[in-house]
Image (cartoon, grey):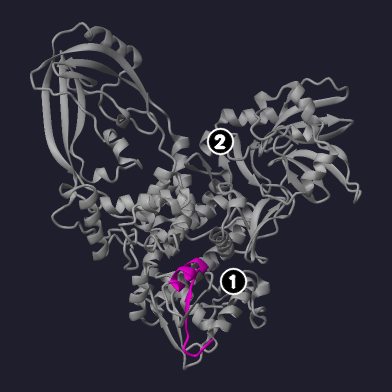
Amino acid sequence: MDKSKKLIIVESPAKAKTIARFLGSEYVVEASIGHIRDLPQRRAQVPDKYKEEKWAELGVDVENGFRPIYVVPPEKQKQVSKLKAAMKGASSILLATDEDREGESISWHILQVLAPKKDVDVKRIVFHEVTKEAINEALRNPRSVNESLVRAQESRRVLDRLFGWTLSPLLWSKVQAGLSAGRVQSVAVRLAVERERERKAFVPAAYWDVVATLKAEKGTFKARLTRVADRQVADGKSFASTGELIKKHEHLDEKAAQAIADRIIALRPWTITNLVESEGRQNPSPPFTTSTLQQEANRKLRFTAKRTMRIAQDLYEGIELGGERVGLITYMRTDSLTLAEKAIAQCREVIRAMFGAEYLPSSAPRYKTKSKGAQEAHEAIRPTGLSRTPESVKRYLDDDQNRLYELIWKRTVASQMVPARVKRTQVETTVEDLIFSASGKQILFPGFLRAYVEGSDDPEAELGDQEAILPELRKGEVVEPVEVKPDGHETKAPARYTEASLVKKLEEEGIGRPSTYATVIATIQERGYIFKRRNELIPTFTAFVVTQLLEKHFDDLVDLKFTAHMEDELDNVARGSLAWDEPLREFYFGKKNDGLVQRVKEGKEKVGYESVAVSDDIVIKVGKFGPYVQRGEGGPGNIAGVPEETAPAELTEEAALELLAARDNPEEIATETPGRTITMQKGRYGDYLQVSENGEKRNVSLPPGVVAAEVTPEMAEKLASLPRIIGKDPSSGEEISAAIGRYGPYVKRGGEFRNLDAWERALDISLGEALQILAQPKTGGKTTARTAIKEIGAIKVMTGRYGPYVTDGETNATIPKTIKPEDIDEETARELLKARKESGPAKKPTRRKRRS
C-alpha cells in the first residue's frame, strides 16, 4: 500500500462496499467480518503453554484476575492475513466498527492483533448511518478506542463464558447431553416455563351476560348487560385463575341469562339514563428502538427478531439505488428515542407536503429514553433520508426489506405529527332494575393516524377500525329493543409469550440488552427449549426439567432481579465506575465460598434427576432420546414417548394415559399380505407405522402432511413396501433405494441422498428416473446425507443425520426449523455459530431412536 493511503476497517463487506463509494482514492476500506479474535472454543485451540492449567478449557485464567485467553480461530486466519497485508505501508488506520460495546471491542481486538507500528496513526471513528455526510463527519471527529466500553464487553463475554461452561456440563449429566445454560437465555426460558405453568394450572370459568340491539331516533346500537339491581354482572376479571368467583358480582349462567332475555324483550320503557361524552387526545408512538422494532415487526409482519435484525442490517449497510449505494436507515442497535435535528426538519417537510399544515405540530415533539439501563447515545432507528418514501425505493428492495423500511418510515413520520383527537362516549340504558352499557369512540381529527395505524400497514384502509361509532343519542331518550339474546363466555388462560411480548418483558425487567434479544430467542429454539406454534413460544418438557433443576439449586441465577443486577454492574463497568473483573470475582468465587464454581462442584452430588408431575402416579421425564411418560416405577406398558412439540400445559392425565395405551395396544391396520402385521404407533416425532413381517419389525414414517386418521389399509400396504430397492447403478454397482424419512421422501445411493417432490414417487420411481435425480446437483432441503447445500465464504450449510446445520470447519450449529437451509445468509450463519460457541462445549450427540 502506498504510504499516503489510509486504511479503514469496518465489520462487514457490504458496509465496506458502501463506504468505499463515498471516499477518495487515498482510502482503502476492508472488513474484519465480525470478530477476528475470541476465547477458545475447545481445548485444542488453547495455546500450548496453558493446556495443563486447571482452567484451560474455560479459556479464562480464573486464578489471576480472570484474564481471558484470546485466540484467532482457524476460520479467521485468512481474514487476519488479508488485513495485515492491507495495513502494510498505510499512514493511518481508522477503526470504523459499529458504535456500540461490541463494535468497540472488535476495534480493540483488531488493534491488538494487527499491532501496527508506532508511526502509524490509529484512530477510532463512529457513525450511526452509512451516508456520505455521516462518514465525512466521522472523519472530521476521530477519537481513541473507549477502554471502558471494551472492558464492559470483555466482562460480559467472560461472565457468559463462566456461566455457560460451568453450568452446562451439570445439565449434561443430570438431564440430557448437548444442553446449555446461559445468563440471559436461562431466564428467558424460565419466563416461558412460568407462563406455561400458569396455563397448566388454569381452570376456565363460564359466565353469561345479555346483549340488546336497541333502536334510537338517530340509529341502532348494541348494549351489554352490566348491572342487575346495582350488582355488577360478572365478566372475565371477576374470576381467579382457579375458576372461582373472587368478586361479589352477579354470576349468570346460561339459564339465568336466557330467562332475563325472554323477560325483558317485552318490557317498556328502555331509557337512556346516563350519557357521558368527552374529548381526548391519542398521542403517536415514539420512533423505533431495537426492541420496539423487533416487537412491531413481529406483531405486524410476523418477522422473528433475528429476521428483523438481519433485514435491518441490510438496510443500514447499504442498498443499490439505481447506481447509488447508500444506507437507508440509521444504526439498528440502539436504546435511544432521540432524532437528529436534520431528521426532524425533514419529517416536518414531508408532513407539510404529504398531509398538510394542519398535521404539523407548532413545535417538534421530543422523546426521552425511559428504557431501564439504556446504553449508547445513538439516535432512534429512522430513515437516513425522509424524502426517500417507501414508494420511491420499493423497486430496489426485496419484499422483506420493503415491508420493514415502510414500517420504519411511517413510524418516524408519525412520531412528529400532531396527536389524534377523539370523542369517547359512555351510554347506560335502563329497563326496570337492569342496566345495559355501550361505549363508542369517534375520531374527530386523525392526526398521526393518517401516517401510522397500530396493527396496519395501510392507514387509509384501516382508519375506520380505530372507531366504534354510536348514533347521536340524548339523555332521557326512550329506545326500542329490536333483539335481546344471551351471550356466553369463558375465561381464557394467560397468553403464551410471542417474540414481541417476550422481548418487551426482558426489556422491562432489564434482562440482557436489546442487541442480544434476537440471538437469545434463536438460541433457546435451536437448543430445544422452545418451539413455535403459529406465533406462540411454547416451552418443551426439556425446558421444564432444566428450569426446575436451576430453580431448586441455582435459583438466584435464573432470578429476574439478580440477572438485572448483573446488567447494572456491567453498565457500571462501561461507565468506568467499577473494575471490570469485580462482577466476575463475586459471581464465580462468591464472598464466602458461595460462588458458582463451588456450588456446581457440590451440585454434582446433590442435584437429582428432575421430572414433571402429570398426576400422583404419572410423570414426564427427559432421557437421551427426549421426553417420555412414565407411570409408577416404569417398565413394560408404563413408558411411552411424548411426541415432539407437545405443549406441556396440554399433556393432561387423560392424554398421558392415551399415549401409554397407544404404546401398549397399538392400533392394528387390516392387511391382505399373509404374515404381515401393520400397526399405528405414536413416537416422539409423531405417528408412524410399525411393520412386523417374518419375525422382524421395522418402522415406516408417515408422509409429510399425512395424519394417522387418513391412513387407509391400501395406503398402509403401499407404505409397508418401503424402503424399496429400485436397482443398481450401472456404473458403480451401488444399490439404489427409495424411502420416506422424517423429512420426506427420498432416493438413496450409498451415502448420497436426493429429495423427491411427492411421497407417492417413492413407490413407483424407476431406476432411470432415480439415476437422473441423483445426477442433478443438490438444491437443499432436509436430508440425511452430510452434503453441502450451499457455501457462504468459509461457511458451509450442510445436511446431516440430525438435520441441517452450518459449519465453519471448527464449530457446527443446528439451523432452527424456522429458517430454510437454502435461504440462510452469511450473517444468520455467523450468528448461529456465535451462539453455539458461546453456549459452551458440546458433547458428541447421541443417535436418537424412537421408543418403540
Placement of 371 over or under 98, stated as above or below: above
Is disc 2 in contact with disc 1, using a CB cutoff of under 8 Å? no
Instruction: Identify the image quadrant of the N terminus.
Output: bottom right
Locate the C terminus and report the quarter of the image it occupies. top right
Q: Secondary structure at mark 2?
A: loop
Q: Which x, y percent locates residue 160?
A: 50, 66
> Would residue 489 be found to the left or right of residue 708 on screen?
left
The local crowd at label 1, few if under 14, some if 14 to 19, many if 20 or more residues have their Cα within 10 Å, is many
Which residue reaches farthest left? 476
Q: Earlier in the sequence, mark 2 or mark 1?
A: 1
Q: Residue at x 53, y 61 (%)?
A: 827
Residue 313 placement (x, y as % from top left)? 45, 60
55 part of magenta stretch: no
Q: Which residues are magenta?
A: 1-21
Residue at 62 percent across and 69 percent down: it is 41
**Which numbered marker is on residue 58?**
1
Which residue in the structure is indicated by mark 2? 614
Residue 251 or residue 790, whichever sits in front: 790
